[in-house]
């Protein structure tokens, strides 16, 4: 199943159709997430994988709330790798999550301007 950049229909369904709440969540996501993504990279560089996993989990939850499916998926892989549940290059997964985040945030900002 193809993951969407932003599945607004699913997000609004989880929020019982509360569009004002959805706008607030989008705005909070736009303002909060960049700092957290930078923190993940820095923590990985410092070998603090558990703290990086916690940040990844936090952003994943926020991304899921707004229907950012591709980002949620990318962060799940990163989180699983940081937990040690899979063998993967955490730096590469972090860079992928940052790439997906950039794509997602651009899409969200365009969408938000239309609301």
Image (spheres, grey):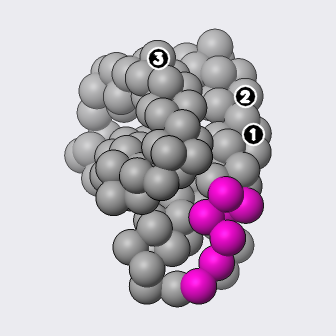
Residue 88: say if magenta: yes
Residue 88 versus residue 25 in the image, above or below: below
Distance (Cα) linking label 1 and label 3 = 15 Å
Region in magenta: 87-93
Q: Mark 2–mark 1 contact, CB under 8 Å?
A: yes
The disc at residue 31 is 3
* Depth order, front residue of 26/79: 79
Instruction: From the top left corner, tell me how far across and down residue 45 is, in percent.
Output: 57, 46
Which mark is in front, 3 or 2?
Answer: 3
Instruction: From the top left corner, tell me how far across and down residue 66 is, in percent.
Output: 43, 42
> Residue at position x 24%, y 46% from top?
16
Label 2 sits on residue = 106
User: In which quadrant of the rendered view does residue 10 lie?
Assistant: bottom left
Secondary structure, mark 3, is: helix
* Depth order, front residue of 5/62: 62
Residue 42 versus residue 85 in the image, above or below: above
> Residue at position x 61%, y 64% from top?
90
> Residue at position x 31%, y 40% from top?
17
Instruction: From the top left corner, tell me how far across and down residue 112 is, in percent.
Output: 58, 20
> Residue at position x 54%, y 37% from top?
42
Label 1 sits on residue = 103
């Amino acid at each position: 199943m193809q993951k969407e950049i932003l599945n607004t229909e699913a997000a609004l369904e989880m929020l019982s159709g509360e569009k004002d709440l959805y706008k607030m969540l989008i705005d909070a996501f736009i303002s909060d997430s960049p700092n957290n993504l930078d923190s993940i990279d820095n923590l990985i560089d410092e070998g603090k994988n558990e703290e990086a996993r916690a940040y990844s989990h936090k952003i994943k939850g926020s991304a899921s709330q707004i229907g950012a499916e591709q980002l949620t998926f990318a962060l799940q892989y990163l989180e699983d790798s940081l937990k040690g549940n899979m063998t993967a290059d955490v730096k590469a997964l972090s860079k992928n999550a940052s790439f997906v985040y950039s794509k997602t945030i651009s899409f969200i900002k365009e969408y938000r301007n239309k609301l």
